[in-house]
Image (tube, grey):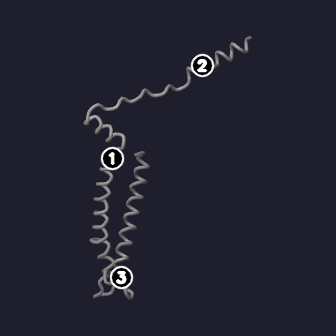
Amino acid sequence: MADDAILEELRKIRTLLEPKPPPPKAPPKNFLGEFKDFLSQYKVMGMAVAFILGLYLGTLVQALVSDLLMPIIQYATPPGVVWQDISFGPFLVGQFLGALITFLLVVVVIFAIVKVSEKAKVK
């Protein structure tokens, strides 16, 4: 008899500890409410900011490569040789090297941004 009472008490405790389902979210009633719900649900503003920042970050890295690094590479090549015109047969190696350097710099910058944001605990 005592075991049955203990089991019944444990069942009551279990039902009290079970999480209750969240109340159903009322659908927005007007266009503005639906629009706000859309923006918050899909985090559109965050994506837009990230896209714009990424676009300008790419422009910044491209300027870094073309205006600062490629003149150094040009300085290291023999006089009269333009690095963009370096080729082996039909292959334009100079333009490929420029694109490769740009890509590697973008990767380094993105890696640094991710590391700094992890350190600052930004998600």
Determine the secondary structure under disc 1. Answer: helix
N-terminal of the pair, mark 3 or mark 1, is 1
Where residue 57 appears, x then y in whole percent? 31, 59
Is the residue under label 1 in contact with that under label 3 (CB below 8 Å)? no
Going by the numbered disc 2, the residue's amino acid type is Ile
Task: Choose between 119 and 53: the one closer to the eye.
Answer: 53
**Element marked by disc 2:** helix
* Residue 67 location, quadrant: bottom left
Of 55 and 65, the residue lying toward us? 55
- Label 1: few (<14), some or many (≥20) within 10 Å? few
Residues at circles 1 and 2 in contact by the CB criterion of under 8 Å = no
| Relative horizontal placement of residue 104, taking residue 8 as reference (left or right) | left
Q: Looking at numbered disc 3 in the image, what kind of residue is underneath it?
A: Leu
The residue positioned 48% from the left and 27% from the top of the image is 21
- Tell me the distance, in whole angstroms, between the alpha carbons under discs 1 and 2: 43 Å
Q: Is residue 30 above or below residue 61?
A: above
Q: Vertically, is 36 above or below 118?
A: above
First in sequence: mark 3 vs mark 2: 2
Q: Which quarter of the picture shows residue 64?
A: bottom left
Disc 3/disc 2 C-alpha distance (Å): 75 Å
Q: Quadrant of residue 58?
A: bottom left
Q: Label 3: which residue?
A: 92
Horizontal side of 2 relative to 83 (left or right) equals right
Q: Which mark is residue 46?
A: 1
Q: Measured from the top left, where is residue 44 in percent x and y? A: 32, 46
Q: Position of residue 84 (x, y in %)?
A: 31, 80
Disc 1 residue type? Gly
